[in-house]
Image (cartoon, helix red, strand yellow):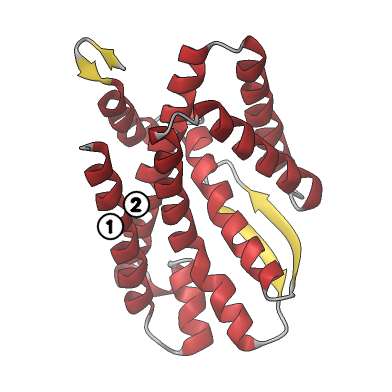
Amino acid sequence: MTFLSIPLIYWFAGLALVLPRIPVIGKWFNLINTAIHELGHALMALILEGSVKKIELFNDASGVTTTSTKTKFGGFLVALIGYPFSSLVSYFIFYLLSFGYDKGFIIAISILFIFMLLLWIRNIYGAIWMIAFCTLNGYLIYLNNEKYIQIAALLYAVFIAVDALFSALIVLFLSIKQKDSAGDATLLKKITGVPALIWGLLFAGIAGVVFYGIIEGLKH
């Protein structure tokens, strides 16, 4: 798909870079990746036979997942998984879209978010956002317009991929400038004693490699 002879994906990549600077609407789109990131924490806790107490999503596009695990190592894995999970999910989404599963992707992410809403979302803003996002997707499915669904799926995919990369880079920056405010990198430092910078580099490295893989995949 193109617009003004330029592939639509490039327009969306530009939007993904510009929209976060626009109040309200930019953060609204960024929360898609945030929700996936927090889902990664929650799933890891469940895999390790722990529990998920709540997930909160905020209007600054940040999120918090409160979990409990049986061991310190379990807590380490839960803290570790967020950024790699969202990056890998972004790669998997583009893989699905390459086979034409645009509608399937829209349905799948909506179902996942509905489960998150019912089971774990416990703050008002997070609940409103989830309901709005899933309602929008439900309307798209109802219209059953293939072009609209393709555009929405590609838009979501680009925003998730770009935000997965940039959020990891932001954590890397914070791990250098504000070591006690670097999110998961700071938490991992508290758990392991390994400097936040190391975790920031790891997150940014994984995100960079996955993003590069997405770009290479789009060339073929």
Residue at (31, 63) in percent of width and height: 204
- Give the crowd class for mark 1: few <14, some 14-19, many >=20 residues within 10 Å: some
Query: Extreme right residue here?
Result: 118
- Give the crowd class for mark 2: few <14, some 14-19, many >=20 residues within 10 Å: many
Amino acid, disc 2: Leu
Numbered badge on residue 147: none
Residue at (53, 34) in percent of width and height: 28
Q: Position of residue 61 (x, y in %)?
A: 52, 45
Numbered badge on residue 165: 2
Query: Extreme bottom residue here?
Result: 193
- Provide the residue designation for mark 1: 208
Badge 2 element: helix
The answer to whether residue 89 is seen in the rendering is yes
Residue at (30, 27) in percent of width and height: 9
Q: Position of residue 78 (x, y in %)?
A: 58, 72
State yes or no: discs 2 and 1 in contact (Cβ < 8 Å): yes
From this view, report whether residue 219 is shown above or below residue 7.
Answer: below
From this view, report whether residue 92 is shown above or below residue 143.
Answer: below
Apparent side of residue 28 relative to residue 128 in the rendered image (left or right):
left
Residue toward you, 139 or 53? 139
Q: Quadrant of residue 198?
A: bottom left
Residue toward you, 167 or 210? 210
Residue toward you, 72 or 27? 72
Q: Quadrant of residue 74?
A: bottom right
Apparent side of residue 76 relative to residue 151 in the rendered image (left or right):
right
From this view, report whether residue 204 is shown above or below residue 115.
Answer: below
Apparent side of residue 198 relative to residue 150 in the rendered image (left or right):
left
Q: How many marks?
A: 2
Of callouts 2 and 1, the N-terminal one: 2
